[in-house]
Structures are given as structure tokens and as C-alpha cells.
Image (cartoon, grey):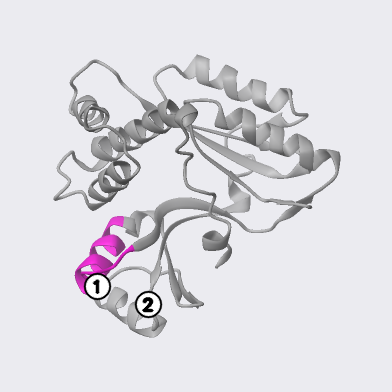
Amino acid sequence: MGRAYQNRKESMAKTAGAKTKVYSKYGKEIYLSAKNNGADPNANLSLRRLMEKAKRDQVPTHVIERALEKASGVGGDNYAVVRYEGFGPGGCTVIVDCLTDNNNRTFGDVRLCFTKTKAKIGVSGSVAHMFDHLGVFAFRHDDEDAVLEMLLNADVDVTDVENEDGIITVYVPPAEFNKAQKALSEALPDIHFEMEEITFLPQTMTEVKGDDAVMFQKFLDMLDELDDVQEVYHNAQVDG
């Protein structure tokens, strides 16, 4: 399962032209984390690390504070998570996660990305079964057996632990994410997570090449332009 770490997409762009989108994306992620697990960063470790990451990426304090206020019911905004599934160019499978305050707008925007790139949007569950839904943690450590033991001692249900070039990758069921995060943070106080998220990992890859590869990149670019899109998961292995 080490592909999760190697295939992790690049950090969000920090160019001047992309700042607004970066701020919006962080704001929604902070909102969602605070809404689901509490707005106190001392109690919500995911929120605390997300806020720290936002500050490192120079997200203004007022953007962070406004997201926390929204999560506490201030401001009137009400975001919901929506997920779209389908088949991208070349027959690859795609999952698009969004955070929106207008389902009709978001569905229309995402569907347009599919239709304009010879892709096909499907019904809920049409491709999700082709992915493993897992919590993933990646960090530097040299002993996967010791990491597994500390997690088992904390009664964490572990799916797998890998060690590749000094990077330990831990996989857990999504329901175990917070417990695993807490156990790792307490056992390794100086831990720095290179990856720390609940994600979808493809069970098999689909080669996408030629004109389909060009169209697939256009598809990703169009989705990236949508403020409501938070994450895109796929099994495309692009040729060249």
C-alpha cells in the first residue's frame, strides 16, 4: 500500500493567482474538521495540525477564525460533504469529494467537468468499491514492529504497517483514525506526520495514455478550478 505516500499529490499552489483558492480550501477543511470533531484545537488534534499547516502556508488568521465561527453556528453558512463517482478519460475510476453550500450548483459544475472531457459521471457506489477507504499516517521512523506494537497496545485496529526508505506508513479503518492519531502522538511526542488523512486508495491501476492522457489532465485541471472540490481520487496511471 506504499503507493499512497508516493502518489500523494503536490502541495497546494502558493502563487499569487492561487491564493484565493488556497484560502477557500483551507477554510472549508477547517470548518469541516471543527464541525465534526469540535472547534477546540487542544481536543481536536486534526484541527490543530490543519490550523498549523494553514499558518505555514500563510493563510490569514481571519480566514481561520471565520471558519471556526461558521463551525460553531455563527454566520449562517451551512456546508455539506457531497461525493461524486464516475469514469474518467481512458476508463479510469474517479471519486470527487466536495464541500458545498449549494448542491445543485456543485453537481452541475462537476458534471460539466465529466461531460467536457469524454468522462461519465455515475451513481453513488458505482466505483467506490474499487477503492480501499482508509486512514493513512506517514512519518519518519525506523522500526515498523515497534510502531505496530504501540498501536496494538492502545487498542487500535491496524490494517497494515509498512516501512519504505525510513518512512513508516500506517493504515487503519476510518473509524480508528482519531484513536490512531492520538496513540501515535502520545507514544512519539516529536512525531511529524508527512501524511495524515482519511483517503481512498485504488485497488488496481488503469493505464491512461495518448489522447486520453491529455484529456485526463484537462479533466483534473477543470476540477481543480472548482472551489467546491476538496479532493480528487483516481486510479489513473498516466503514460508519459
27 above or below 78? Answer: below
Q: Main secondary structure of the magenta part?
A: helix
Q: Quadrant of residue 224?
A: top right
Q: Residues within 10 Å of mark 2 (few under 14, many from 20)?
A: some
Q: Residue at x 23, y 62 (%)?
A: 182
Please give the range of residues in magenta: 178-192
Looking at the rendering, in which quadrant would you find the N terminus? Answer: bottom right
> In x, y percent, where is residue 240?
78, 52
Q: Residue at x 41, y 81 (%)?
A: 144
Q: Return the residue at label 2.
A: 141
Residue located farthest toward the right when viewing the structure as drawn: 210
Picture disc at residue 188:
1
Q: Nearer the viewer, residue 103 or 195?
A: 195
At label 1, the amino acid type is Leu
231 above or below 170? Answer: above
Q: Report the Cα–Cα distance between label 1 and label 2.
A: 10 Å
Q: Secondary structure at mark 2?
A: loop
202 above or below 166? Answer: above
Q: Are marks 1 and 2 in contact (CB under 8 Å)?
A: yes
> In x, y percent, where is residue 16?
45, 30
